[in-house]
Amino acid sequence: MKKLKKFFRVFAVVLIVANFLSCTNENEINNQEITENQKNENVLKIFYDAEFSFGEVIELKNENLIIKEVIINNYPKRRGYITIHKLNNTLMYLADIDQEKLEIVGIDYFK
């Protein structure tokens, strides 16, 4: 289990570093923050169609990125990870790991 988490963290960092982001100004960030939070949670609600909560959070300060663990409450063998751009709070990547089906699904929202 720990190896899988470590593998995914390395995998997520590689994906993040591969896509460099452009920055927005501070006024735009403040105006978009609440809307982006709601949009990010709506994406997770649609994708998982289940109750979820957030677990560990990793902040990559040099890259202005945040990686959050998504815990799906009714599925203990399933975890998700999202990558959010810290400056404008936009969802960039979603990775879902299902240990029962032995599947990893990745979605790139950065396009």
Image (cartoon, rainbow, N blue to C red):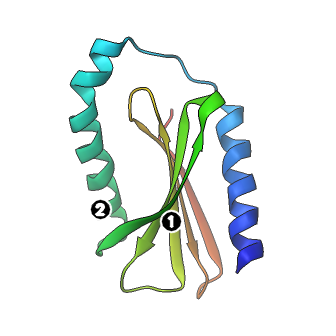
| 67 to the left or right of 49 | right
Image location (x, y in percent) of residue 86: 46, 33
Where residue 41 sits in the image (x, y, percent)? 29, 54
Total number of numbered labels?
2
Does residue 1 appear left or right of residue 29 in this picture?
right
Residues packed near mark 1 inside 10 Å, few (<14), some (14 to 19) or many (20 plus): many
The image shows residue 83 at horizontal and vertical percentages of 52, 46
Q: Amino acid at mark 2?
A: Ile
Kindly state the secondary structure of the residue where label 2 is placed.
helix
Measure how far apart labels 1 and 2 are at the Cα level: 13 Å
| Residue with the mark numbered 2 | 46
Image quarter hosting the N terminus:
bottom right
Residue 22 in the image: above or below residue 15: above
Q: Residue 6: horizontal and vertical position, in percent?
A: 74, 65
Residue ID at (51%, 78%): 78
Q: Amino acid at mark 1?
A: Gly
Identify the secondary structure beneath mark 1.
strand
Mark closer to the observer (1, 2): 1
Q: Residue at x 41, y 14 (%)?
A: 24
Residue 109 marker: none
Q: On screen, 18 above or below 78?
A: above
Please tell me which residue lies in front, 62 or 10: 62
Along the horizontal axis of the image, is 23 left or right of 14? Answer: left
Q: Earlier in the sequence, mark 1 or mark 2?
A: 2
**Residue in the picture at 44% in, 72% down:** 71
Q: Which mark is residue 80?
A: 1
